[in-house]
Amino acid sequence: MKPETVIYESKPAWLILQLSFPPGDRKECTIKVILDENISETSQMEMQLGDVVDITLYADYEESPIFIGLMSA
C-alpha cells in the first residue's frame, strides 16, 4: 500500500443483522490486525450499527505501528 491509502470494507451481513435487532443494540466485537512481520494489535470494542472501525498503520502521532479506533455515528 502507498502512504495515505484508504481501504473501505463493509460490515459482514451477520454483524449487520445482529446490530439491527432490536434497534439500537450493541455488540462486543474483537478487531485484530496483523501486519506482514507478525506485528499485531487487538482491540475489543462495543459497536452499534452506524459505528465505523478506523485502522491506521504507521501514523506519526502513534506509539504503536497500528492504531484501532471507533468512530460513532
Image (cartoon, helix red, strand yellow):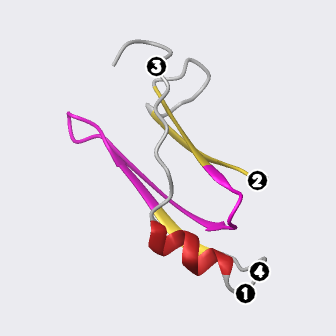
Magenta part of the protein: which range?
31-52
Distance between mark 2 and mark 1 Cα atoms: 18 Å
Looking at the rendered structure, the kind of residue marked 1 is: Pro
Q: Reading the chain from its start, which is encountered first: label 4 or label 3? A: 3
Say which mark, if any, is on residue 72.
2
Q: Earlier in the sequence, mark 4 or mark 2?
A: 4
Circle 1 residue:
22
Q: Identify which amino acid the numbered label 4 is placed on.
A: Pro
Give the quadrant of residue 16. bottom right
Judge left or right: residue 35 versus residue 47.
left
Q: Which dot, 4 or 2, sits closer to the camera?
A: 4
Q: Hey, which residue is sitting farthest bottom in the picture? A: 22
Give the Cα separation between the discs numbered 4 and 3.
Answer: 34 Å
Mark 3: few/some/many CA within 10 Å (<14, 14-19, 20+): few
Which residue occupies 72% across, 80% down? 25
**Residue 47 position in % (x across, y down):** 65, 66
- Amino acid type shown at disc 2: Ser
Residue placed most toward the observer, 45 or 25: 25
Mark 3 near mark 2, Cβ–Cβ under 8 Å? no
Residue at the disc numbered 4: 23
Q: Residue 22: horizontal and vertical position, in percent?
A: 72, 87
Side of 73 relative to 42 (left or right) = right
* Mark 2 Cα shell of 10 Å, populated few (<14), some (14-19), many (≥20): few
Provide the secondary structure element on which disc 3 rests: loop
Front in this rendered view, residue 50 or 32: 50
Q: Is residue 50 above or below residue 35?
A: below
Asked if marks 4 and 1 touch (Cβ < 8 Å), the reply is: yes
Q: Which mark is residue 5?
A: 3
